[in-house]
Amino acid sequence: MPILIDCVKIILGPHFEVKLTPSALESGASQREQIISLIEGSAFAIVVLDGLRPNVVFELGLIYGKNKPLLLFREAEAIVDIQGLYSKPPAELRVSSPAVNLDTQLSDIKDINYALWKRFDLEGTLNLVWLEYSKKREVIPGYVEIKEPSLCK
């Protein structure tokens, strides 16, 4: 995800304070309460489905519950991170990780459109972040018009 995060910072960073979880969280305080506070205080949220991890799905639910505008990205090669469900996967675990499929794995939101993102496409990612942000001009409080990016200029 580093390319996507860098592109978000390039496109949106000059206009919005970009905060990432968990790095924006303070030690010694409730993680859940801080995440809720970050979501409540945000103009909009960005969620990246790159492994369908339970914590990301939880945050996605909070974002919907708080009615925040959302930029939703699904990594083109995303698989369900089954190994990540274990602190130490059992040696006998021989389950292959299926591709992320919102229609079946998150069927309650299968009608929500997402942007398909390719993790190794820098220029495509830069343009995709800009395009998805631009589509939200009517729903993002404090929306700022941002010039279309180009790596060639």
Image: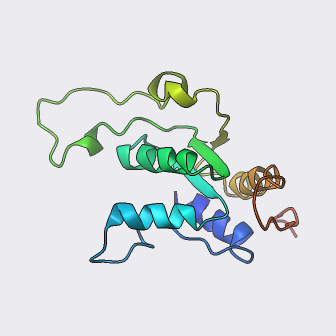
Residue 8, located in which quarter of the rendered image?
bottom right
Q: Nearer the viewer, residue 48 or 57?
A: 57
78 vs 148: above or below? above
Confirm whether residue 49 shows in the render: no
The structure residue drawn at horizontal position 30% and vertical position 77%, both measured from the top left corner, is 27
Query: Could you tell me residue 25's position as x and y percent?
Result: 40, 72
Q: How many marks are shown on the rendered structure?
A: 0
The structure residue drawn at horizontal position 48% and vertical position 29%, both measured from the top left corner, is 106
Q: Nearer the viewer, residue 117 or 152?
A: 117
Q: Is residue 117 left or right of residue 104?
A: right
66 vs 96: above or below? below
132 vs 77: above or below? below
Query: Could you tell me residue 50's position as x and y percent?
Result: 49, 44
The structure residue drawn at horizontal position 63% and vertical position 53%, both measured from the top left corner, is 68
The structure residue drawn at horizontal position 38% and vertical position 64%, both measured from the top left corner, is 33
Residue 80, located in which quarter of the rendered image?
top left
Query: Could you tell me residue 11's position as x and y percent?
Result: 73, 67
Residue 4, located in which quarter of the rendered image?
bottom right
Q: Is residue 123 left or right of residue 109?
A: right
Name the outermost residue toward the top. 104
Which quarter of the image is occupied by the C terminus? bottom right
Display colour scheme: rainbow
Confirm whether residue 103 shows in the render: yes
